[in-house]
Amino acid sequence: MEFGAHNLWWHLPSYGWEIILITSFFTCLIVFRLNKTLKKYFIQFYLLSLVLKLLMGGFLVGLILWLDKRLANENAITVLITYIVFTSLEVFFLYNAINKPDKTEFV
């Protein structure tokens, strides 16, 4: 990734990999947890997960602002972009999981 970033003249900010790893970890955790949730409580758990991810993102931006004021804008934009990308992936996977036909119905 760094080779491609170097050739395209863009770079990850100072905490780019940490932001990507933390956001992907929480997204995977949410998707696995919501796949095991009963359909009756799915919407409540999904809305709770969105609120928790927003709070986590705000905390992460605040922590990065405190640690690295010089590259604060780049890091904050990276948090925003990873939030949008991983939330979109989360919606895609959860939509497919909810709408797949239940195999036990046809037995």
Image (cartoon, helix red, strand yellow):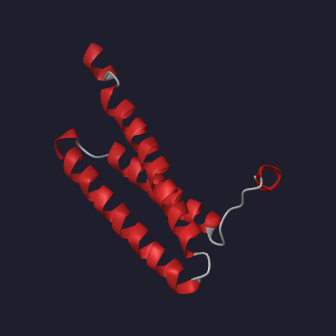
Residue at 28% from the left image edge and 13% from the top image edge: 106
Q: Is residue 48 left or right of residue 6?
A: left
The image quarter in which residue 6 lies: bottom right
Q: Residue 61 appears at what percent x and percent y?
A: 47, 73
**Residue nearest the observer in this picture, 101 or 85:** 85
**32 and 18: which is toward the camera:** 18
Q: Please give left or right for residue 55 compared with residue 44 in the image.
A: right
Q: Is any part of residue 107 visible from this angle?
A: no
**Left or right: 39 as drawn, with respect to 74:** left
At x 35%, y 63%, the residue is 54
Residue 18 showing in the rendered view? yes
Q: Residue 81's spot in the image, x, y percent?
A: 50, 55
Q: Could you tell me how many numbered marks the image carries? A: 0
State which quarter of the image contains the C terminus. top left
Task: Name the residue located 36 percent from the left edge and 51 percent from the top edge.
Answer: 33
| Vertical position of residue 104 compared to residue 22: above or below | above
Q: Is residue 21 above or below residue 104?
A: below
